[in-house]
Amino acid sequence: MRRSRRDENNRVGYLMVSPYFIFFLLFVGYPLMFSLVLVFHKWNIIGPMKFIGFGNFWQLLHDALFWKSLGNTLIFLTIHIPLQIIIALVIANILNQRIAARGFFRAAFFLPVVVSGVVVTILWQQLYSQETGLFNTLLSRIGLPKAPWLISTRLAMPSIAIMATWKNVGLYIVLFLTGLQSIPLSLYEVADLDGASEVQKFFHVTIPMLNPTMVMVVILSTLGGFSLFIEPYVMTGGGPMNSTLSCVLYIYKQAFYFNHMGYAATLGFTVALIIMIVVIIQRKLVETEIYT
Amino acid sequence: MKKAIFYIILSLVAVAFIYPFVWMTSATLRPEIEISSLSPFSHNFSISNYKAVLEKIPIGRAFLNSLFVSSSITFSVLIFSSIVGYALSRLKFRGRDPIFMVILFTMMIPFQITVIPLYVLMVKFGWTDTYLALIVPGMISAFGILLFRQYFKAIPQAIIDAARIDGCSDLGILFRIVWPNSIPALVTVAIITFMNTWNEVLWPLIVIRKQSIMTMPQMVTLFAVGGQAEQVGAELASAMMLAAPVVIIYCIFQRHFIASMAYTGLKG
């Protein structure tokens, strides 16, 4: 009797997880395996596949555009992550005080998060526009020269990073706010007894206690940076002079402009590998033990 | 004094977040020559930009496509992810925990590695330019499974036992007992899934070329990139039409949106 119940449980259990495994094999497992085939072949998707050994990886090592796209991602992340954390921390700390209309402010900061990236990109393309954009109109109104936001090779990627911060920071404000509210008040009371100043409390209680949120923010922003696509695709097409070419945009171009399926798969494979390594390193660097 | 500074900072930031949307709304209603104006007011408001969008692209069709695709995926994710989540949290069977670890692991695979082979698979299936390519690969989500498993764990065993004694099957227990007790989890998964699908652009751009199957963000993107819009006002108007449904729903269910996304840390 007991045994049959267990067999029955096994059977129902496997049956109920089977949708995931069928799905997984088809849409994750097979593509993963197939990507390992693709990286060793040259293929234009129409003709036959041609085995070229490590040819794709050799090409990748010498592909200036691939390195450029990685460099652009790095520029994006070095601006985006600190900006994101500082703004989110400041706003979250203010919202954590006794503030009237907190709900309204929170909802306002969160608005760009729910709006499609396409909408935000089209909107900011106009805000950044050289002659008619809101930013340049403001600048010239106060007597400053117009800035070549999306036209200059130096400024284009930072401009996209600023836009991405505006789009996402609301989410991080809410995450930090949740983190702040979970810090036990007793910790601050102990700090008060020790005569700690506001600044000391912030750096020795608040920041260490927010570490799990900090790790999450850094990793999510990093994944966002490596997934950047629609922003450069709509705003700049990767230009000027490839200064906003992102990893995913480059994969997309290789695959769908030039039909280099094997090489695009190799790029995807390598970028995925880099993402995993970067995230592991970030965890090692940012994650700390919490002392309570 | 300190409070006053806080309110000033908050208000300035709130303006920075809201004003661009106000400006955008007004820009879609203004003639092209007034586009660089800082003020959102004008004496020449008209809906000609929206008319231009409706004339140039079948955006109504794209809206229905997006609605169909996003609803199908959301419905399917709720059903299938909750079935798997139920098995992983309420049934004891051999290999359950290793299976859960595998699912956790699959969540961490970056999409960059699978996107090209997945496209090739769609080509082999003959699914490109069909709804199948848009819907089927999104029909179950590891994140949904994770969230349901977590939530279902907290449901008291007693009510499940009671249903079992009454002769309820496991699927019956899930849909008649567990679901009604898990509304917050269902809402969270539904909001996140719907929003992610509604806002997705890269995948539709890859698998759909036929205009009649295009999703709304895809069509708006191509409208802007292809230069078909010709006028900035029309481009912004198409973006406005894409944003409006989400913004309206967000204004009504704002608390649920924020709570859901804060809980999962996922963004749209």
Image: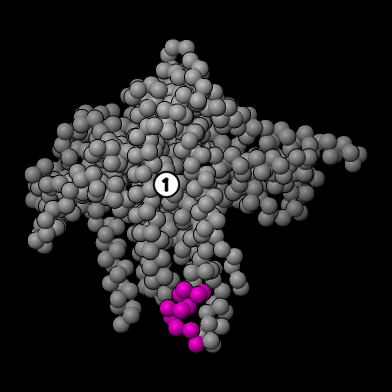
Return the x and y of residue B246 as percentages of the image width and height.
37, 46
Does B122 sit above or below residue A210? above
Give the quadrant of the C terminus of chain A.
bottom right
Q: How many marks?
A: 1
Please name whichever residue, A210 or B1, is drawn nearer the observer in this view of the structure.
A210
Please say if A227 is above or below B64.
below
Residue A200 highlighted magenta (yes or no): yes
State the image quarter where residue B201 is shown.
Answer: top left
In the orientation shown, which residue stands out farthest toward the top? A47
Q: Residue at x 75, y 46 (%)?
A: B163
Determine the residue positioned at 42% across, 31% down: A60
The image position of residue B81, as x and y in percent, is 60, 40
Quarter occupied by the N terminus of chain A: top right
Type of amino acid at the residue the image marks with label 1: Gly
Q: Residue at x 41, y 76 (%)?
A: A98
Q: Is residue A116 visible?
A: no
Q: Mark 1 — residue?
A: A224
Which residue is at the front of the view, A46 or A24? Answer: A46
Which residue is nearer to you in this view: B144 or B173? B144
Q: Chain of mark 1?
A: A
Q: Is residue B200 magenta?
A: no
Q: Residue at x 23, y 39 (%)?
A: A240
Q: Residues within 10 Å of mark 1 (few under 14, many from 20)?
A: some
Q: Would residue B245 appear left or right of B124 to someone viewing this image?
A: left
| Residue at the extreme right of the image, as rendered | A1
The span shown in magenta is A195-205
Residue B234 in percent (x, y) is at: 19, 38
Q: Is residue A196 visible?
A: yes
Q: Main secondary structure of the magenta part?
A: helix
The vertical placement of A91 against A115, above or below, is below
